[in-house]
Image: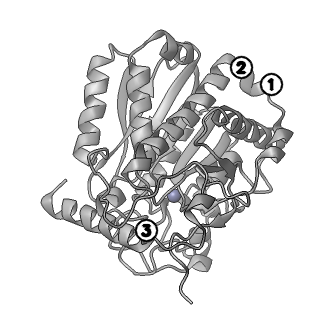
Amino acid sequence: MSIKSRFRFLAGLTVLIAFLGFGVGSAFGDTDIVPGGPWITDTQNVSLKRLNDYPQLVKKLEQIEKTSKGLVELEVIGETNEGRDIYLAKIGYPENDAVMIITQQHGNEVMTTEAALRMVQFLSTGSNKAMEILDELYVLIVPRVNPDGAEMYWRYNVDPDAPARNTSEGFYTSWTAGVGWDINRYHWVTDWTLSTLYQNHPAAYPENPVPEAVAVINAFNYYNPIWIADFHHQGTYVTDEGDSVTSSILWPRHPDVAADVVDLSKQLCVVIFDHMQQFGYSTVTLYPGGTYAGIGRNGYGLAGAGSILVELKGGIGQKQSGMIIKHAYEQMWSIFQATADGSLYEVDPDRSDEIPPRGSWYYKDLPPE
Ligand SMILES: [Zn+2]
């Protein structure tokens, strides 16, 4: 990370923390929030030591590959507009069924990548526990789909040619022109010409203009995973019972996704829901997501793979970052394990009805009058 981009990263984080405005005043009494705390206060700084910037991420991945005795192979699946390589870590044996995890499509959703990196590291050891997975599955992980946006510490990719936001035109971008695209609206996996952007602007956008989405699509189409899980961060939500929501999950909701694909995706969600019950800090709820076909969750479902969205709690300080990283890691582990031992397929998909709604956005400060 250059000094300039490191400054932008720090500035972005400071702004984020200021925006979240963790103060003493609260619309809820502090004691209303059951596990999921503690919260950061105005005087705490978020430790950046946990977070790997791009050069550190690449260095760690290369070290893991080197010491994995052939168990981990890195592949560059694309290049960003700023010239950064997008890495896919391939773990295990290509003859096994492939499963795929992607993280940090949105540049400022950082802890998911830390969890993914730890998972790559753990599987690379080839321990007995790791081999329970790798004897059955070829694990594909893209840690940080959006390295340019991560360096800027913002949601979008980086593209000076991106127009200002106008979703009816297919411009899922920043409100400011010249910032970048929301990668998670451009997973038109089977046919770009179906996209809202192409339909409105076929001459200007004969191809998908979002290289990070294209990289994931190409890897998906090449390796043909049985499922894909897409990890994000949302804000902070609280259930009607007052529990702080640690993650929200969802399956494809586009009406053209095949019923068996929806069922497999629901099975993955139920596995996560069940697995996370054992952790006192965990409250898993349903993400209220829509049907837009270009969202990864819907796009890969339309392409015939099990496909889920996982949103981790956002707006967290250093005291919670470790918990959230572990949370995401456990979610990844649960779906690897259930797929490898076959228990995934025994799950009743209708049990997805048991996953409670997400709850309300939580304001630490009183909302403005
Ligand atoms: Zn996101």
Amino acid type, callout 2: Gly
Secondary structure state at the residue bearing disc 1: helix
Q: CA distance from mark 1 to mark 2?
A: 7 Å
- Give the residue pinned by disc 3: 22
Q: CA distance from mark 3 to mark 2?
A: 44 Å
Q: Is residue 75 left or right of residue 164?
A: left
N-terminal label among 3 and 2: 3
Residue 152 image position (x, y, % from top left): 30, 63
Can residue 335 be seen in this snapshot? Answer: yes
The amino acid beneath tag 3 is Phe
Q: Is mark 3 within 8 Å of ligand 1?
A: no
Q: Nearer the viewer, residue 277 or 156?
A: 277
Q: Extreme top residue here?
A: 128
Nearer to the camera, 73 or 310: 310
Quarter-wise, where is residue 67 in the image? top left
Local packing at callout 2 (Cα closer than 10 Å; few below 14, some 14-19, many 20+) is few
Residue labelled with disc 1:
346
Q: Could you tell me residue 174's position as x and y percent?
A: 44, 75
Disc 2: which residue: 342
Label 2: element kind: loop
Report if the beta carbon of the residue with label 1 is closer than 8 angstroms to ligand 1: no
